């Protein structure tokens, strides 16, 4: 029987970290509880940043609510710099050390910076990940730039493009791939969203990359593409992915790299030799965990729902008396996005799908539910303005149903199974 903890440290003042803290208290933990964050802000909600905050509908203060009697000591604006497993202590940027009996690592991700540091430092070049990023970019959009250039073919790039068009700001979206959003939605739905973006006035350029940026007095004035095209712009948003915050774990002995911090099915962090690191857990975007819905393939998921679910699971297992009392993290990844007047929802992970079928509605109507299969099994489902059927397909994914699932679905069109 493991000794009950008296000191718990959560590194990452995030959705996952705050969720864990709340569930620790709800489960009766009364000991010392410290949340460490490298930003000066208390845990806040990120989804509104690329939507309502940029539009000026919300302020950048999207602080997550929590009970006033939560009894948490916040150590904000102090990043963790080192983990000493042998001494069970976390070192912070100010030189202080926080001893722990249990540790939750929930350090999340940060925006991948523009690869050229001199160009990245130009006035008018932005990234979007945190609250301060959204506040700066939102202020720039409210000042009405002549044209925004967006780099990146993922959801953030498309959400910002949608916001720009809502504000009647000209926008060029540069996507390196031949089809946008293909990794997340597959080429058919990704191509559909690209068509909608163009109809809404986005200058969408596929298979396009920037060769160089042009500056005047330290301010961005134009970009030149690799095909020689020059685009005048005083505002560029680099939405080129994220980096997982694991650098502070170097030398700790934990298995952590660009793919995230590896943990087992119970959210326990693992040593480089594959053994369990006693008393250390992981949750949220930084964690790389075995997905039970994909034969335990390791996955790191940057989704709001997973951060909450994994924070809750980690909290429960931190207080479990021994391994036999722990519960497995079995969250089915889910995601949603709002852009160009459409609501897109996804359950499961569509990447790697070898088949695709529209189960309800149609691509032409742009109101549909589609399923994804791999090796004859249903692995994911996506809806566009048609989420009422999604729970049934979520169940089919969990049950490892054959593809296509629910063959007698109401209002199902003549089914055409296609490559994704």
Image (cartoon, rainbow, N blue to C red):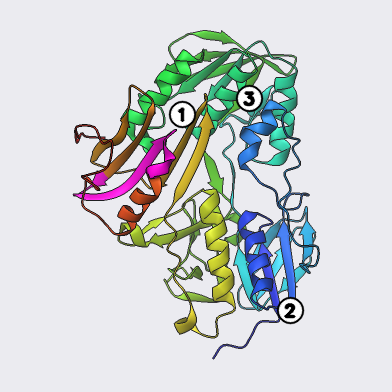
Q: Please, what secondary structure does the residue beneath circle 1 have? A: loop
338 or 125, nearer to the observer: 338
Q: Which residue corresponds to the image point at 46% horizontal and 53% vertical from the top-left?
A: 300
Distance from disc 1 to disc 2, alpha carbons, whole Å, reads 45 Å
Tag shown at residue 153: 1
Q: Please, what secondary structure does the residue beneath circle 2 have? A: loop
Tag shown at residue 119: 3
Residue 127 drawn in magenta: no
Circle 2 is placed at which residue position? Answer: 31
Q: Which residues are magenta?
A: 373-389
Q: Which residue corresponds to the image point at 75% horizontal and 52% vertical from the top-left?
A: 42
* Picture quadrant of residue 419: top left
Instruction: Classify 10 Å Cα crowding around label 1: few (below 14), some (14-19), many (20 and above).
Output: many
At which x and y percent is residue 220? 67, 17
At which x and y percent is residue 138? 71, 27
Q: How many marks?
A: 3
């Amino acid at each position: 029987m493991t000794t009950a903890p008296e000191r718990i440290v959560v590194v990452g003042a995030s959705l996952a970290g705050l969720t864990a803290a709340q569930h620790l208290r709800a489960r009766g933990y009364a000991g010392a509880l410290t949340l460490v964050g490298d930003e000066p802000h208390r845990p806040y909600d990120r989804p509104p940043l690329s939507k309502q905050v940029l539009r000026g509908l919300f302020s950048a203060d999207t602080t997550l609510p929590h009970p006033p009697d939560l009894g948490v000591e916040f150590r904000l604006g102090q990043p963790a710099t080192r983990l000493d497993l042998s001494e069970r202590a976390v070192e912070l940027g100010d030189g202080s050390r926080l001893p722990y009996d249990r540790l939750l690592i929930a350090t999340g991700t940060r925006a991948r910076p523009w690869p050229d540091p001199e160009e990245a430092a130009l006035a008018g070049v932005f990234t979007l990940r945190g609250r301060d990023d959204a506040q700066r970019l939102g202020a720039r959009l409210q000042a009405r730039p002549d044209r925004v250039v967006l780099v990146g073919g993922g959801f953030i790039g498309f959400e910002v493009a949608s916001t720009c068009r809502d504000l009647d700001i000209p926008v060029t979206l540069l996507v390196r791939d031949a089809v946008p959003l293909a990794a997340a939605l597959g080429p058919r739905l990704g191509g559909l969203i690209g068509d909608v973006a163009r109809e809404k006035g986005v200058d969408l350029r596929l298979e396009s990359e920037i060769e160089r940026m042009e500056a005047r007095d330290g301010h961005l004035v134009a970009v030149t593409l690799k095909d020689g095209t020059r685009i005048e712009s005083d505002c560029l948003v680099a939405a080129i992915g994220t980096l997982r915050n694991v650098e502070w774990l170097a030398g700790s002995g934990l298995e952590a790299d660009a793919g995230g911090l590896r943990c087992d099915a119970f959210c326990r962090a693992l040593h480089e030799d594959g053994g369990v690191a006693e008393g250390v857990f992981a949750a949220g975007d930084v964690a790389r965990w075995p997905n039970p819905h994909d034969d335990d393939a390791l996955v790191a998921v940057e989704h709001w729902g997973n951060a909450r679910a994994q924070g809750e699971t980690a909290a429960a297992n931190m207080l479990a008396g021994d391994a036999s009392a722990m519960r497995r993290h079995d969250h089915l990844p889910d995601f949603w996005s709002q852009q160009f007047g459409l609501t897109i929802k996804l359950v499961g992970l569509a990447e790697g799908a070898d088949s695709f079928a529209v189960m309800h509605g149609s691509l032409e109507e742009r109101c549909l539910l589609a399923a994804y299969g791999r090796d004859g099994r249903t692995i994911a489902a996506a809806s566009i303005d048609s989420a009422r059927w999604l729970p049934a397909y979520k169940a089919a994914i969990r049950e490892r149903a054959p593809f296509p699932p629910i063959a007698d679905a109401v209002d199902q069109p003549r089914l055409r199974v296609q490559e994704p």
